[in-house]
Amino acid sequence: EIVMTQSPVTLSVSPGERATLSCRASQSVSSNLAWYQQKPGQAPRLLIYGASTRATGVPARFSGSGSGTEFTLTISSLQSEDFAVYYCQQFNNWPLTFGPGTKVDSK
Amino acid sequence: EVQLLESGGGLVQPGGSLRLSCAASGFTFSTYAMNWVRQAPGKGLEWVSVVTGIGDSTIYADSVKGRFTIFRDNSKNTLYLQMNSLTAEDTAVYYCAKSNFAHFFDDWGQGTLVTVSS
């Protein structure tokens, strides 16, 4: 099983600031990596797939990068609606696995 | 617009069974693989199972293998999860999620809560 790790656990950011979230895979997942946003009481929402492709309707301030074992989600200028938990997920191997999440909260 | 609506959650005793349903609309259901993903209270996301579009192949997480069965009825645009031998560790919100061309999840239901407790 591929183990996904995320850092930091919590990221405190002020609106307008840049947020950088990291995701690491225990072995290469090529570019088969997705990012999701989850707000309290809501289902997750797909943000990024293929490591760097924004899903339909996702604002351009969200960008993804990386390949192999190291990935980054960047929010260029954080908006108030971006406070949430962010999960990465690999879809290169079975079983599909998620990282433990990074909570982005207000500084 | 894609809609996925789960139902069937509730309180069940340890060792009991429950069947979840997910009614799909807004897309050609039989074209897409479908998944169940769960989230224990206050915890992260855990993929549970996937079934192919025509229902001929399934894969399970080790944590549920042999106890859960995923299946679908394409004539009813509905996905199911039959859960047997439930334990407290199965307590979670269960989401159905649609796979895109690869196995990431581009649409999710709102979830249904399963609580296993005596």
Image: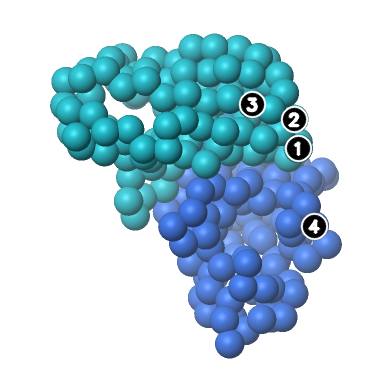
Chain colours: A cyan, B blue
Q: Which residue is mark 1?
A: A1
Compute the Cα span from label 3 to label 4: 24 Å
Q: Using the rendered image, report if marks 1 and 4 lie on a common chain.
A: no
Compute the Cα span from label 4 to label 2: 17 Å
Q: Earlier in the sequence, mark 1 or mark 3?
A: 1
Q: Residues within 10 Å of mark 1 (few under 14, many from 20)?
A: few
Q: Using the rendered image, report if marks 3 and 2 lie on a common chain.
A: yes
The image shows residue A104 at horizontal and vertical percentages of 31, 35
Judge whether residue B3 can be spotted in this image.
no
The image shows residue B1 at horizontal and vertical percentages of 40, 38
What secondary structure is found at the residue carrying circle 1? loop
Nearest to the eye among marks 3 and 4: give it: 3
Compute the Cα span from label 1 to label 4: 15 Å
Q: Residues within 10 Å of mark 2 (few under 14, many from 20)?
A: few
Q: Using the rendered image, report if marks 3 and 4 lie on a common chain.
A: no
- Callout 3 amino acid: Ala
Identify the residue shown where x is 74% and y is 30%. Answer: A93
Marking on residue B65:
4
> Which one is nearer the viewer's eye here, B113 or B87?
B87
- Callout 1 amino acid: Glu
Q: Which residue is mark 2?
A: A93
Marking on residue A25:
3
Q: Earlier in the sequence, mark 3 or mark 2?
A: 3
Q: Image height check: is B66 above or below A15?
A: below
Q: Quadrant of residue B34?
A: top right
